[in-house]
Image (spheres, grey):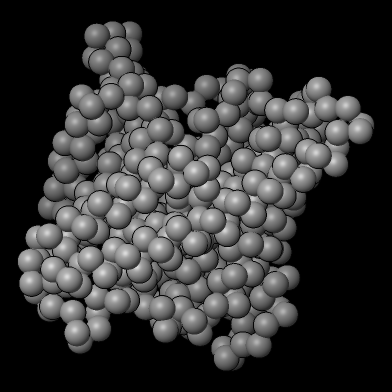
Amino acid sequence: MYESFSIIFVISVLLSYINYKWIKLPTTIGQMILALGIAITVMAMESVSPLTYAFFCDIVQNTDFTHILLDVLLGFLLFAGALHVNIQDLKKEKWSVFLFATFSVLISTFLIGGGLFFLAKLFSYDIPFIHCLLFGALISPTDPIAVIALLKEANISKSLQLKIEGESLFNDGIGVIVFSGILLFTEVSDVMQHGEQESIFLAITELFLVEVILGLAIGAALGFLGFKLMKSCQDDKFLSTMISLAIVFGGYALSSMLHTSGPLAMVVAGLYIGNAIKKPSFNDTSQENLIGFWYILDESLNGVLFVFLGLAIHLIEVESSTYLWMIPFSILLVLGARFISILIPYSLLKHSEHSWLKTTYILTWGGLKGGISLALAFSLAPELSKNTILLLTYSTVIFSILVQGLSIPKLVKKLY
């Protein structure tokens, strides 16, 4: 795994350089497009150079994308993303962020699940409804990694940026929890007796409460204790940065051992520390060093993630050409569900915007999907319609990043 990850890291740096010198797209999109090009080229060379193709396959397969992203990279990327968010500004959008990160995810999950079930019947394929819900759960959250990376390139208002950033930072953790709950129900549904249904739903409720409440509490404790340690040695700029690194390493491992949400813990810890170090009482040099370190780490790991998204096309299996016809319909289904899931809760809030419906359009189009959705799809067992869900997920993610990501600035300019 180490060798494969190292090779992908080197590739990401080289592609970043090529994009910087000649292509000049937003960095993450440029990297992914180039990686897609490499993957398609190597796949076309299978009969001409089987050794090259086999080498490429080994690199992608041995990386273990699900483990690398969900158990390693995600904690660092979420902490780094939260580090730059101003809590006082975020408070102004707290109700929007809360509703989008919770109710919107649930609404979207069931809309997409029901829509996919109907779509499969339309194409004469039998995909169990519970499997369709799994797709709805993993594709509903917006990916904070993709969103934050691409928002840097889009000239949008501060209020709108906070809505999108805040939602994406929190709803991936909620989405993973909803996905885990549906997966738990799937694992026991075949053997569940009627009298056991109540205990199953209690287990799912307990899972949700433990993951969310305990995850938030651990994140707050890590942020508070971590900052106290950093402040006590703030004159040593390197030690302060090392403590922040230990918070992510140790905090994510602790969350895993306690079976709670590591992503939510890292978001809260990052928010606390990021705002605490900006106070006048904290050493300016240590603050600049810490922010600079996490910026470089964030950019580097983002590059690895987006390069893998491009290379992962090799891992997608198409069982029938009919599934290819389902791709455009599933993309429209995800966008439609996103619009409705934003419109319903957002219409209940008071708005300072002149046209909140325009904001809803941008929130819909700016709800990018990314690596987390793909990692969850890879984690499915084959008997849970994995190949179908993986194909639809990958197609939606690629469309989201390439089409939606590149067109967000134009949409904002047109509507405002």
- Taking the view exactly as shown, the residue that stands out farthest to the right is 194
In screen coordinates, is 10 left or right of 365?
left
Name above or below for residue 98 compared with residue 210: below
**At which x and y percent is residue 187?**
70, 28
**At which x and y percent is residue 118?**
80, 40
Residue 65 visible in the picture = yes
Residue plotted at (88% across, 27% down) = 193
**At which x and y percent is residue 77?**
34, 53
Q: Nearer the viewer, residue 321 or 271?
A: 271
Residue plotted at (64% across, 79% down) = 357
Number of residue marks: 0
Name above or below for residue 301 compared with residue 268: above
Residue plotted at (9% across, 66% down) = 237
Q: Nearer the viewer, residue 407 or 72?
A: 72
The image quadrant where one finds the N terminus is top left
In screen coordinates, is 139 left or right of 403?
right
Name above or below for residue 51 compared with residue 134: above
Tell me the quarter of the picture where residue 232 sits: bottom left
Residue plotted at (33% across, 21% down) = 62
Tell me the quarter of the picture where residue 197 sits: top right
In screen coordinates, is 50 left or right of 160?
left
Residue 334 visible in the picture = no
Q: Nearer the viewer, residue 61 or 242?
A: 242
